[in-house]
Each structure stands twice: as C-alpha cells, then as structure tokens.
Image (cartoon, coloured by chain):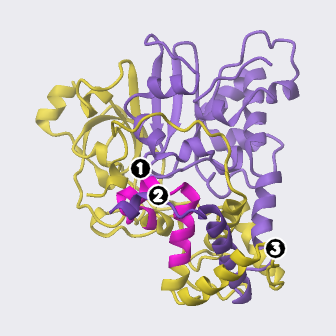
Chain colours: A purple, B yellow
Amino acid sequence: MSERFKYREDREAHNAARVRALEALLIKKGIITDRTVDTVLEYFETKMGPFNGAKIVARAWVDPDFKRRLIEDTPKAIAELDLPDGMAGAEGEHMRAVANAPGIHNLIICTLCSCYPWPVLGLPPYWYKDPTFRSRAAREPRAVLAEFGLPISEEVEVKVWDSSAQIRWFVVPERPAGTESLSEMELEALVTPEAMMGVAVAKAA
Amino acid sequence: MKLQHYLGGLEGLGPVSTETRVFVEPWETRIFGIHTAMMALSAQLPLPQTPSVFHTIWTWADLRKGAESLNPFDYFKYRYYEKWLGGISGYFIDQGYITEDELDALTEEYYADPRKPLPRAGDPAIDDRVTKYLVEGDSPARDVVATPEFSVGDVVTIANVPSVEHTRLPGFLRCKTGVIETVYPGAYTYLCDTGADGIGAAMAVYCVRFNPNDLWPGNAEPNFSLYADLYARYVSPADVSESIKAA
C-alpha cells in the first residue's frame, strides 16, 4: 500500500522520456507526422486562446447591445466579430456566456472533468483541472474564491455552473471602474482567463 | 460507485491550487498534442481520409473512461497530464498499434539521451486534417426532433441510473430535486453510448438549477445556486414528496 503514495524519484525525467518515446513510435508507425504535435500547439498559440475571449469581453464592455446579444445567443454574437476561423470549432461548438453584475457573481466549474471553451479561452489552467477545486467549488465557492484572493460577500449571489453536457461556459466580468478613457484594445489587456472563468474579476491596470 | 463521479462537495481536501499555468512541465505539451491529434484522426469523424494508419475511435469519452477507471488514490496522486500519458499509452498498446515492450525500450533510450531526435516522417495531409478538426469541431447537435418533456420552471428529480463505466451525471446530483433553468434548443448526442447509464443517442438537454442546501443540507454556503447541464435521460418528473419540499 505504501508504494501507492510514493512517486518515483525521477518522476519528470521518466514522464518526459516516455512521452517522447510515444511520440517517436507514433511517427514511426505512421499514425501522426513529425509536425503534428507542433501543428496543434501552434494553433493554440495563434488561433485559439484567451486573446479571443479578451476581445469578446472588451467589445461587450463598450457596446451594451453586443453584450445583450452575447448573453442571448453566444455563438451568433461571437460570429459578428473579426476573430480567426474556428470560433465554433473544437470545444466551442456550443458556448454560453453569463455576465457578472452588481449583486451577481458567476463561477464556471467542471466536476466530472475539465470542459473548457477552447476557441475563446484556449486550454484550461491547472487550477481549473485540480480535483480539489472541482470538489470544493460545488459546495463552498466563496471559500474557494477567497483562496484566489477574491472575497465575495454573502449579499452577492454566487452562481456556479457545472459543465456536464454540450455547453462550454465563460463569464463576462464587470468592466472595472476608472477605465472610461481606455480604448477597446487597452481594455482587452485587463481581461484574464481567471476573470473569464470567475475566480478573479477584471481590474484597472 | 466511482469516486471520480462524485467529486462535487467532497470535504477535507485542503486548499485549492491557484496555479494559472496550462502546462507545468514541457513534456505535458506533447501528450496534449498527441491526444488532440487522436481526436482529429478518430475514425467516426466525417473528415477527409488521410494516410494515417489510425483507424479506431478516440474521443474525450475514451480519455474520461481511463480517468474514471483509475484507483481513486491514483486519481488524486497523479497530475492531470500524467493521467493522460498513462491512459493514451495504454490505449495504443491495447489497440495493438504499439507494444509495451517497444515503448519501454524506447523510453529507456530517450531517458538516457533526452536530446535524441524524433524520427522525421509523415504526410502533411494528416496535419491538415488535424487543423480542420480544430476549426470545424464536432458538434453533438443533431437535426432530429426532440420533444422536451419539461419546460422552464418545472421541478424535476434527477434519476439514479445504473452506475457503469462512464457517465455525464455528476454523482452528487443523483436523486436530488431542482428546477429547469433552460431547455436547450434541439437534440444532442454524446460521444459514445454509455449503456445502462443511457446517453449517446440524440436527446434534449436541460440546464437545471439546484439549491446547494438541498444537495448538502446545513453544509453549503448561503446565497448561491448550482446549475448543471443534464441530458434528458438523467432528468425525471419530480418525486411528489420532493416537489413539496422544493416548492
């Protein structure tokens, strides 16, 4: 039994060698090419990522009508924007945005796995995939948010959305005070993946 | 029952991770790329044929089945992409694409010389299909008439379907009562047929709101609601006794 609680001492070196051996075998056997993994990774660096979500949120901040359309029909509103092809692609086929407002704070979780809206947010950060987060956020979201440095008072209603079917969720955070003079592009820089999942709020720089 | 189906609400786990990185070791990027390529090359997709010899099905459901079949201690012990590495390596071995012996032997070679280069090979059509999958996705929406049994505001009780290999029903919602928040338009498949669990074929999907104090009586925070997207299979008419309580 004690073996179950031990890691091998060369844990990461072994993992690294094993994944490289696997990739090498898959190339050798003709399953993937020597460019396949890099093709995927480059796609997430340039086409699918939180930079898209930041543009969507910044537009919602400057255009209340767009924000209303975004909440009503998320994919349709996103399609209005000049974003890369694929905003309804893998893990974004059916997305739904929910908006924070005075008295309402939204938090997105996935208690069964790690469902995440790839086209607009890219890949999930480690905190989102952490079994402890996934367990605790369902029952004690305020305690969890406090650990992220985000105190939410009991007067604010917390809405926790568990992604267990086809919908991939994200949050439209509130526009921070004191940003009235910022351009849309400057506003984009204030939008983090954490704010778009609800473990943070957007802050003026 | 499997612990992995019942994560929501577990107590005594200590602080959450606030790690904002997507990958914490460089090798993790490679297993993510392999998994995504497998999904893109999976046999059931209506995408162009390629010279890849991959001829079986690999979806999120297969990855999830692997994670859900782990010993619960291992599930908590191993980091996210370590579980992926184990599950994906196991799949290629089980399906006969590679042998465990050749994987072990080559692992030793790369362990001894991490800079040993990867082989150079492959037809670009394979990578074109991978990109096409990322752009087009694989929508579970189906153009069939779904006649939703419930409407917004209906009180419903969550079914206690047989516990099998894989499910999309969070365990902590079984037998609990909630209120329909959204009836999603259309009908949605799941990536595989989950057998007695009952999803796979196109069916309605609901978003259901739960009062956390009904889920964990006296032991949930105040002024919050938990919403879950649930396939129609999991949603039943309210138990009469439960609906009185929820009203």
Residue B35 appears in the figure: no
Residue A48: image location, x then y, percent? 75, 51
Quickly name the residue at label 1.
B205
Quickly name the residue at label 2.
B188
Residue A65: image location, x then y, percent? 71, 24
Q: CA distance from mark 3 to mark 2?
A: 46 Å
Q: Earlier in the sequence, mark 1 or mark 3?
A: 3
Quickly name the residue at label 3.
B115
The mark closer to the camera, 1 or 3, is 3
Instruction: Check contact, mark 2 vs mark 1: CB within 8 A.
Output: yes
Is B111 above or below relative to A49?
Answer: below
Which element type, helix, strand or loop, lies under badge 1?
strand
Left or right position of B243 against A116: left
Q: Disc 2 marks which amino acid?
A: Tyr
Q: Disc 1 marks which amino acid?
A: Val
Is B64 above or below relative to B46?
Answer: above
Specify the segment rendered in magenta.
B66-90
